[in-house]
Amino acid sequence: MGKDTTQKTLADYLSLPEGARVELINGVFYDMAAPTVIHQVIAHQVGHMLGTYVDQNGGDCIVLNAPTDVQLFADDKTMVQPDVLVVCDRKRLTRERLVGQPDLAIEVVSESNWMTDVHIKKKLYFEAGVREYWILFPKEKKIQVYDFESGADVVPKEYSFQDKVPVGIWGGKCCIDFQQIYEKYCFLEKEK
């Protein structure tokens, strides 16, 4: 992962060529590699399951997948693209992006971005007021769930890809079945 450490702004971000895979975090560009097929299957399936729950239960929440720009602090120094996000306050959405924090942010970790997702973004999401943050580790087949409404020192709940993970922002009424997701891509792990 490349990192350009000269201070950048939202104007610099918006002037990038269309399709550039970059996030702006505290005025610094972080390059993002193209996601793998496994990464995409996981993100799509999680987003689909969340969206199905919203469709079946009504409400104002919107489920979005990357690449969706999130102007996390509504400032000109940070623009991220979580793999999956849930927004329940539609006033924060514009035609171009989410201005402010999502209620739920989910990142699928790859070798090129694990430091950003596990450390940098976790801190950012907490500071921005994200209610819940999931970090998915496909290689290790584990999920860490942070309930940020509990405070800064929250210890994540850990799950495996054999579990049904409850969505805290909805009181656990929705569960994401990771065994079902794993079955969609497990054939790819047999490749050499």
Image: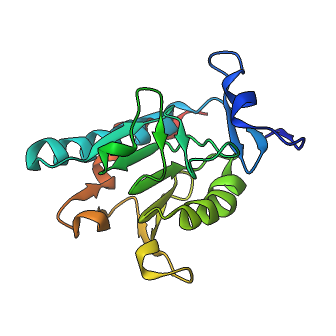
* Of the pair 145 and 91, the residue shown nearer to us: 91
Determine whether 181 is above or below 125 in the image. Answer: above
Which residue is at the front of the view, 36 or 4? 4
* Quarter of the image that includes the N terminus: top right
Which residue is farthest top? 18
The percent coordinates of residue 186 (x first, y second) are 42, 41
Question: Residue 135, percent across and down?
Answer: 51, 58
Q: Position of residue 78 (x, y in %)?
A: 66, 46
Q: How many numbered marks appear?
A: 0
Identity of the residue furthest to the right in this view: 6
Asked where in the image residue 112 lies, by quadrant, the reply is top right
Q: Residue at x 41, y 47 (%)?
A: 85
Give residue 14's position: percent from left, percent from top: 66, 25
Q: Residue at x 52, y 42 (%)?
A: 70
Image point 20% across, 47% down: which residue?
A: 60
Q: Quick check: can you spot residue 165?
A: yes
Seen in the picture, residue 124 relative to 65 is either above or below; the reply is below
Drawn side of residue 143 relative to residue 88, left or right:
right
State whether residue 166 appears in this view. no
- Judge left or right: residue 25 versus residue 79: right
On-image quarter of the C terminus? top right
**How is the protein colored in the picture?**
rainbow
Report the residue at 15% width, 49% height from top. Answer: 59
Closer to us: 137 or 129: 129
